[in-house]
Image (spheres, rainbow, N blue to C red):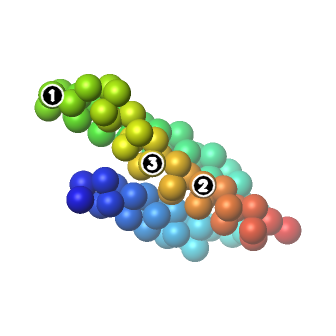
């Protein structure tokens, strides 16, 4: 459930950011979001590992949490590019 919440939050953040910014700035927003979301996923990874999960268990989950919102961000940035 926590994984789905993180993915949903990432998607909502991307959607909000892309909606608020002009189409010409969306690539920059996608880049900034990618770095910021990586920091959030890193924090979540460390939290999971501090609760006894191994890196091997956590890595696929964290990859999904990172890739879904970031892929959406870049897709939206590319889709609305002029």
Where 48 sits versus 12, above or below?
above
User: Circle 1 sits in a helix, a strand or a loop, which is it?
Assistant: loop
Q: Return the disc, 1 or 2, that comes first in the chain's sequence.
A: 1
Comparing marks 1 and 2, which lies closer to the viewer? 1
Real-space Cα distance between discs 3 and 2? 10 Å
Of 5 and 29, the residue lying toward us: 5
Q: In the rendered view of the protein, which quadrant contains the C terminus?
A: bottom right
Q: Name the residue under label 1.
A: 52
Is the residue marked by circle 3 packed among few (<14), some (14-19), or many (20+) residues within 10 Å? some
Residue 4 in which image quadrant: bottom left
Spot the residue most to the left: 51
Spot the residue most to the front: 56
Residue drawn at (70%, 54%), measured in percent from left and top? 27
What x and y, as percent, mark residue 11? 46, 64
Q: Can residue 7 be seen in this view?
A: yes
Q: Return the disc, 3 or 1, that comes first in the chain's sequence.
A: 1
Spot the residue most to the right: 82
- CB atoms of marks 3 and 2 within 8 Å: no
User: Circle 2 sits in a helix, a strand or a loop, which is it?
Assistant: helix
Q: Return the disc, 3 or 2, that comes first in the chain's sequence.
A: 3
Q: Name the residue under label 2.
A: 71
Residue 55 in which image quadrant: top left
What x and y, as percent, mark residue 16? 49, 69
- CB atoms of marks 1 and 2 within 8 Å: no
Is the residue marked by circle 2 packed among few (<14), some (14-19), or many (20+) residues within 10 Å? some
Q: Is residue 33 visible?
A: no
Of 22 and 56, the residue lying toward us: 56
Q: Which mark is residue 64?
A: 3
Real-space Cα distance between discs 1 and 2? 29 Å
């Amino acid at each position: 459930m926590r994984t789905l919440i993180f993915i949903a939050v990432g998607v909502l953040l991307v959607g909000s950011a892309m909606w608020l910014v002009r189409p010409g700035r969306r690539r920059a927003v996608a880049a900034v979001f990618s770095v910021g979301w990586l920091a959030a996923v890193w924090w979540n990874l460390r939290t999971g590992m501090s609760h006894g999960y191994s890196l091997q268990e956590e890595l696929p989950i964290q990859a999904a949490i990172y890739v879904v919102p970031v892929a959406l961000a870049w897709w939206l940035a590319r889709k609305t590019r002029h």
